[in-house]
Image: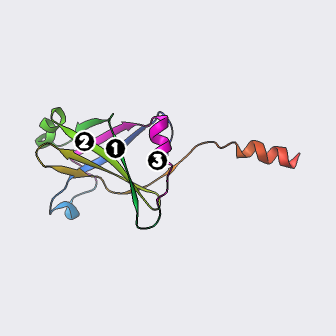
């Protein structure tokens, strides 16, 4: 997954229960939509050490219910966070006011940005 500033990141969310392992990855309950601001993208450019993670609270996001059973959650209280682990691998978690939790599968991601390396290489060769 490539991440760029001002692009939208969409992650599928699944209700976290004992049946999670048998769920169809193509049929999430919710979609979490986040616009990648400069600040959020900078936080996502980390690659945590082995056996550690980085939790990133997100305040601006949009939820889309793909399962009618969870439509009411969108108007209720909820908090979302992104989690990075070594790889970097990105996942999301949504906590709702009725002690319901939704999680996304981990996705391999690598932020893309221009460091200006091409300009330095040309200058060194010339």
Residue that numbered label 1 is attached to: 57
Residue that numbered label 3 is attached to: 44
* Mark sitting earlier along the chain (2/3): 3
Q: Position of residue 107 (x, y in %)?
A: 40, 55
Helix, strand or loop at label 1? It is strand
- Horizontal side of residue 46 vs 21, given as left or right: right
Report if the CB atoms under discs 1 and 2 are less than 8 Å apart.
Answer: yes
| Magenta residues, start to end | 26-48
* Mark sitting earlier along the chain (1/2): 1
| Picture residue at 47% right of the left edge, 63% below the top | 49
* Mark sitting earlier along the chain (1/3): 3
Residue that numbered label 2 is attached to: 79
Real-space Cα distance between discs 1 and 3?
A: 11 Å
Pick the quarter of the image with the C terminus.
Answer: top right
| Picture residue at 58% right of the left edge, 43% below the top | 113
Q: Position of residue 22 (x, y in %)?
A: 20, 64
| Picture residue at 44% right of the left edge, 37% below the top | 36
Closer to the camera in the image, 124 or 32: 124
Helix, strand or loop at label 2? It is strand
- How was this image coloured? rainbow
Camera-nearest label, 1 or 3: 1
């Amino acid at each position: 997954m490539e991440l760029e500033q001002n692009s939208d990141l969409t992650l599928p969310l699944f209700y976290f229960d004992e049946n999670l392992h048998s769920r169809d990855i193509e049929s999430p309950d919710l979609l979490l939509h986040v616009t990648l601001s400069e600040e959020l993208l900078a936080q996502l450019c980390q690659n945590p050490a082995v056996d550690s993670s980085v939790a990133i609270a997100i305040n601006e996001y949009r939820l889309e219910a793909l399962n009618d059973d969870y439509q009411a959650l969108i108007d209720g209280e909820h908090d979302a966070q992104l989690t990075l682990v070594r790889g970097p691998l990105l996942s999301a978690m949504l906590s709702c006011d009725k002690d319901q939790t939704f999680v996304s599968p981990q996705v391999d991601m690598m932020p893309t940005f221009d460091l200006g390396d091409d300009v330095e290489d040309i200058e060194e060769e010339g």
